[in-house]
Image (cartoon, helix red, strand yellow):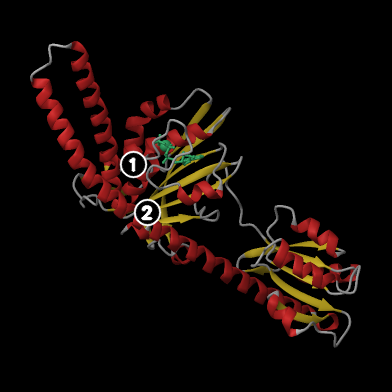
Amino acid sequence: MNNNELLSFSDEQAHQPCLPINKKAEPWNLLVVDDELSVHEVTQLVLKNVTVLGKNIAIHSACSAEQAKELMGSKTHFAFALIDVVMETDNAGLSLVKWIRETKQDPNIRLVLRTGQPGEAPEQDIISRYDIHDYKEKNELTAKKLFTLCYSCLRTYNDIIKAKEMQKMLRHSEKMEAVGRLASGIVHDFNNILGVILCNVELLQQNPFQNEQQDKKINSINKAALMGKDIVNKLHSFTTNKLENKESVNINDIITRIDKVIDQSSASNTKLTYQFDSNIWLTYIVVSDFESALFNLVINAKDAIQHNGNVLIQTSNCVLDDDFCQLNPEAIAGEYVLLTVSDNGKGISPQVMQRIFEPFFTTKTAGTGLGLALVYGFVNRSSGYITLSSELDVGTTFKMYLPKTLPNH
Ligand SMILES: Nc1ncnc2c1ncn2[C@@H]1O[C@H](COP(=O)(O)OP(=O)(O)OP(=O)(O)O)[C@@H](O)[C@H]1O
Ligand SMILES: [Mg+2]
């Protein structure tokens, strides 16, 4: 697997339980905007217990365009809206549509206009300019037709969201590939430069100066060059694809061996919990790289906890099926060992998420920004897959999928 076959960001990846931010499948949110109470009652009656693409429908009601704007200003993501044209004014519905597309700038929500005044269809211009999914007269919408309309809106909405998600992932993969190429160029050039510095320092140290000040300066050049080498080495493991030192291992055993060190790495305000699947499969990885990936994830989780909080380290077996791979086009279906590290810390903003695996990207004053680049490099070299889901002020979950292997690989 190469760099661009690796990464996905999503809130809906939770095939396995995860304590802090475990979420049930969110329902589709439908907004009914109509000044006639009976329309809300009928829609509730018809769609209340309906399931579309595996999710229920939550129906929200607004009796005017103004009320609809208030509801749409909340955190709820609406998948589609059934909007009456004539409400508080003759064109309240049309101005709501304009507001949704132009002011709120929501291009995804499916909009269906309905009117009680037959023959008064809005002009073609409005239908195409505001991407109106359908236009119906109220008496046309029998129970059966309402369901068909609802189904077609949700299907289209789902396809739009999926296509945009894939585009985002593709752009991200291309960016990571470019960053990888850049990093590997830097590694090569800096290794040469640092080699020259360290070699000359070594020669100078063989014949110390009589002057203590000069020796101190040489030592500090040596120290700085070694620190530089350490960074270059980390970058190197982000970019290389070495196969040596891989072993078939049980990750429970590795975590148990180093759990004391992990505990010490977390502050007293953090409670660390382990949940192991005792029948965990083996995976074929470089043990030291796994250890350092785990440390980086735990230290980040700990850093994200501002007051008291929990970090959960879980292991489990997991099958990535075709449904998962359809949602995550860069994942390869198969059997995986899953390591999940979750925290209920401050969460990650969408802006930070976009850049999180880039080498040298950090939001910390004393961070190098290489921790997650190392995790990324490790997962990539192990032919694995990594996902990240996060919500501000709720928490973050990293899931590292490592392919299952057989004992005598
Ligand atoms: N669990 C998390 N919760 C919140 N933010 C996180 C979490 N993990 C990573 N981040 C964000 O991702 C950024 C990059 O993380 P990364 O581990 O690569 O570098 P760093 O932690 O900043 O520095 P270093 O690991 O080199 O000390 C962090 O600065 C932080 O903003
Ligand atoms: Mg870090």
Q: Which residue is mark 1?
A: 251
Q: Are marks 1 and 2 in contact (CB under 8 Å)?
A: no
Which element is circle 2 on? strand
- Asked if residue 226 is positioned above or below residue 242 in the image, the reply reads above
How far from the left and from the top, in percent, is residue 234?
Answer: 29, 40
How far from the left and from the top, in percent, is residue 397?
Answer: 50, 45
Q: Which mark is residue 336?
A: 2
How far from the left and from the top, in percent, is residue 47?
Answer: 75, 69
Which residue does the image show at 45% across and 36% down from the upper left?
300
The amino acid marked with disc number 1 is Ile
In the rendered view of the protein, which quadrant contains the N terminus?
bottom left
How far is disc 1 from disc 2 in space, using C-alphas?
A: 12 Å
Which residue does the image show at 61% across and 74% down from the upper left?
156
Number of marks in picture:
2
Q: Residues within 10 Å of mark 2 (few under 14, many from 20)?
A: many
> Residue 161's image quarter?
bottom right
Q: Nearer the viewer, residue 12 or 224?
A: 224
The amino acid marked with disc number 2 is Tyr
How far from the left and from the top, in percent, is residue 97?
Answer: 76, 70
